[in-house]
Image: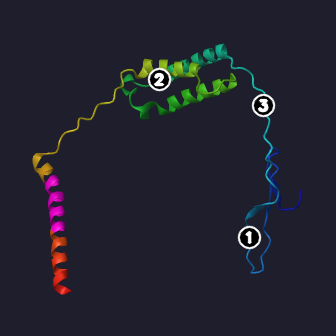
């Protein structure tokens, strides 16, 4: 490899040359430019083992037990407020993702999804979003909001008519 040249891992045939030389105006160019063409050959897919669903189901139970233990330290009245258990939930999600990949399964998958739904039903079934009741504005406000555009429209029409009559006099 030449001095000042950097290369990427072997999966890419693209390398870059660091142009740190001085230009004629005395300034240095610290940029990098490509020197080789990009390898357009498709990479062969890695052989993949089939998903070990029974092992994944066992690991989901392990992740769930850890989450249940962590949630046991939080007062149940705060279970509906995510700010109180966000780190525990993050660890649970990370656990399910890691265990899925170790079991050669994609994430999320039906096994993980059904387990997460069970966890949600257990801990968060009583968390409901309060419906916001929309009320009409007071009658005075509503009247003003209706009349302003009506009067502005009438004023614009009157202005156009007045200007058109005025241009006849000036012409």
Q: What element carries label 2?
A: helix
Q: Residues within 10 Å of mark 3 (few under 14, many from 20)?
A: few
- Residue 93 versus residue 26 in the image, above or below: above
The CA distance from mark 3 to mark 1 is 40 Å
Mark 1, mark 2: which one is toward the viewer? 1
Mark 3, mark 1: which one is toward the viewer? 3
Q: Quadrant of the C terminus?
A: bottom left
Measured as percent of width and height from the top left, residue 153 is found at 18, 62
Residue 55's label in the rendered image is none
Question: Which residue range is magenta in the image?
Answer: 144-157
Indicate left or right for 136 with 88 as reference: left
Residue 146: in magenta span: yes
Upstream in sequence: badge 3 or badge 1: 1
Residue 46's label in the rendered image is 3
Q: What element carries label 1?
A: loop
Q: Which of 46 and 128 is in front in this view?
A: 46
Residue 71's label in the rendered image is 2
Residue 29's label in the rendered image is 1
Measured as percent of width and height from the top left, residue 28 is found at 74, 73
């Amino acid at each position: 490899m030449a001095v000042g040249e950097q290369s990427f891992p072997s999966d890419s045939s693209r390398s870059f040359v660091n142009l740190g030389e001085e230009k004629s105006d005395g300034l240095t160019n610290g940029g990098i430019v490509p020197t080789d063409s990009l390898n357009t050959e498709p990479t062969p897919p890695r052989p993949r083992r089939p998903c070990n669903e029974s092992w994944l189901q066992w690991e989901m139970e392990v992740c769930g037990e850890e989450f249940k233990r962590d949630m046991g330290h939080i007062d149940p009245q705060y279970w509906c407020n995510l700010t109180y258990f966000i780190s525990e939930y993050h660890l649970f999600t990370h656990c399910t993702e890691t265990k899925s990949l170790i079991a050669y399964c994609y994430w999320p998958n039906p096994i993980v999804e059904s387990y997460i739904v069970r966890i949600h039903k257990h801990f968060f079934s009583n968390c409901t979003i309060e419906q916001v009741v929309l009320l009409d504005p007071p009658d005075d406000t509503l009247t003003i909001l209706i009349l302003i555009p009506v009067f502005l429209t009438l004023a614009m029409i009157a202005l156009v008519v007045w200007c058109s009559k005025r241009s006849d006099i000036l012409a």
